[in-house]
Each structure stands twice: as C-alpha cells, then as structure tokens.
Image (cartoon, rainbow, N blue to C red):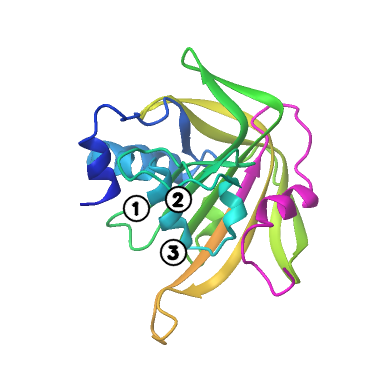
Amino acid sequence: MDDDQQWAETPVKRKGPPRWMLGCGCGCLLPGFFLVALAAWGMQFAGQATNPRLAYDALAGVLDYDESLMGRATGQVDDPGTRDLESHEDPDFELIFGIEIPFSKGVALFYFAHGVRQTDDEFEADEDAMIAILTRLPSGQSGSLTSSKDGGEPIQIEVQGVTLQGTRYEEMESDVSVRFPMGTESVSGPGVSVVVLHDVAEDPDDPKSKLFDVVLILQRPVEGGAMVTDDDVRAFLAPFHIGPDR
C-alpha cells in the first residue's frame, strides 16, 4: 500500500490538496495539456502529485538535490498515514506539485512557490514572491514552454561550474490555479527560463535511450516586479546537483 492510499484511509488526519496551486507554466503549450490531463486522469493523480513525499520522490528521479531543498530538518519521522512532511519544515520554496505524467513518455512537472498564498479563492503574492517550474521534456522541445509579450534577451548563467543557456523576459505570463484543480487565472511578471540539463539519457546504459532536457522557469507573479537576476537563479538551483563546483 503506498502513501497516497494510506492517506485516503486515514480520515482523522487527512488533509486535502492545497486549494491553489500552479496550473502550468507560461501561457503556451503546457497549460492546456495539463488541465486536460487532470480531467482525464482524475483526482488520483492530482492527489499523488500534491503529496509532498511522492512529489519529492518523483523529483529525485529527474534531478538530484540536497536535503536542504526540503527545508529545516525537524528530527521527526514522517507519518505515512498523513500527507504532511513532518521531517522538514519552512522550505524557502515549497514544492506544491510534482509528478512524472503517466502516458506522456517521460514528461515530468514540478512547481515551487515562495511568498504566494490563496485567500478566499484569490491568488496573492508578496513583493518578493517567486514561482519556480521545473520541467523534464524530450530534447529539442524546450522552446515550447515559454510565451511572453517581448522576445526576451538571450543569457548565459554560470552555475556550479557550468554555463546554462537561457532567456530573460521583462514580462511573461503563467496560468495559476486558484480553485483546485481546474480554476485558473493569468498572472504576469518578469521571468527567466534556462536549460538546466541538456540531452540527458533516460537510461544511461542504453545508447539508444530517449534524451531529455530539464528546463527551469523562474517568475515573479507580480506585474512590474523586480527582474529575476542571475543570482536568483543560482540561489534556487543551489540545492540541486547541476555542475561539479558545488
């Protein structure tokens, strides 16, 4: 019996999924695909994706990370009968959704948020709020993730001894869900997209294995907010295993 089934059978301690979560990233291919997928696959997959333990497990299969990503260690042991993460608390970026999408041939989506919340079905963001979206998708498709009112500025960012290629936008759009799982509203703000990993083999031991890219989108969900800097990207990626200089 997996964690999600145990949660469903423990009504006393049960906590439902968050009422708001990121719908999908950046106003182009993925929002429609994601919402249709949720409708087709039902609440079972949504429940798995919003279970912190399952989401972190799925993330580990896409990109290695340090325990610090999960927040401060509490010394407690996670209770498999709840959806809480008792072993850690107060992460800088909360992982609110994460899953390898079934039947997608390896596409995986992970959504993090800092300084955002939902109040009375309305999305609210602090001045320093940030949305982070990590996506694994087949190599060569990273350009389908972003849509913006400006063409963006090509950038290179040194992270952990490697150079990441990306684009900085003065304004980009994202769909944010405020009524789980289907109600969304559009938010705009400055952002950055970078290719974190490029042409990673699904099976390193198979020379014919499918190749994937891992793409990061960082966005301030506030129109007219401060630009997302290279240091913002480095700070978010610090717990992840990106390059040799860690």
Mark 1 lies on residue: 101
Front residue of 172/181: it is: 181
Tell whether position 236 is magenta: yes
Residue 234: numbered disc:
none
Mark 2 lies on residue: 109
Looking at the rendered structure, the secondary structure element under dot 1 is loop
**Which residue type carries mark 1?**
Ile
**Labels 2 & 1 near each other (Cβ < 8 A):** yes
Mark 3 lies on residue: 61
In the image, residue 174 sits, relative to residue 64, either above or below, namely: above
Dot 3: within a 10 Å radius of its alpha carbon, few (fewer than 14), some, or many (20 or more) residues?
few
Determine the main secondary structure of the stretch shown in magenta: loop
Looking at the rendered structure, the secondary structure element under dot 2 is strand
Q: Give the range drawn in magenta.
A: 217-246
CA separation in Å, label 3 and label 2 = 12 Å
In the image, residue 162 sits, relative to residue 55, either above or below, namely: below
CA separation in Å, label 1 and label 3 = 13 Å
**Which residue type carries mark 3?**
Gly
**Labels 3 & 2 near each other (Cβ < 8 A):** no
Of all residues, the one furthest to the front in this rendering is: 75
Front residue of 109/57: it is: 57
Q: In this view, does 227 lie to the left or right of 238?
A: right
Q: Which residue is drawn at 56% across and 48% down?
A: 70
Residue 153 lies, in percent from the top left, at 76, 51
CA separation in Å, label 2 and label 1 = 7 Å
Q: Which numbered disc flags the more N-terminal residue, 2 or 1?
A: 1
Front residue of 201/10: it is: 10
Q: Residue at x 46, y 16 (%)?
A: 121
**Which residue type carries mark 2?**
Leu
Looking at the rendered structure, the secondary structure element under dot 3 is loop
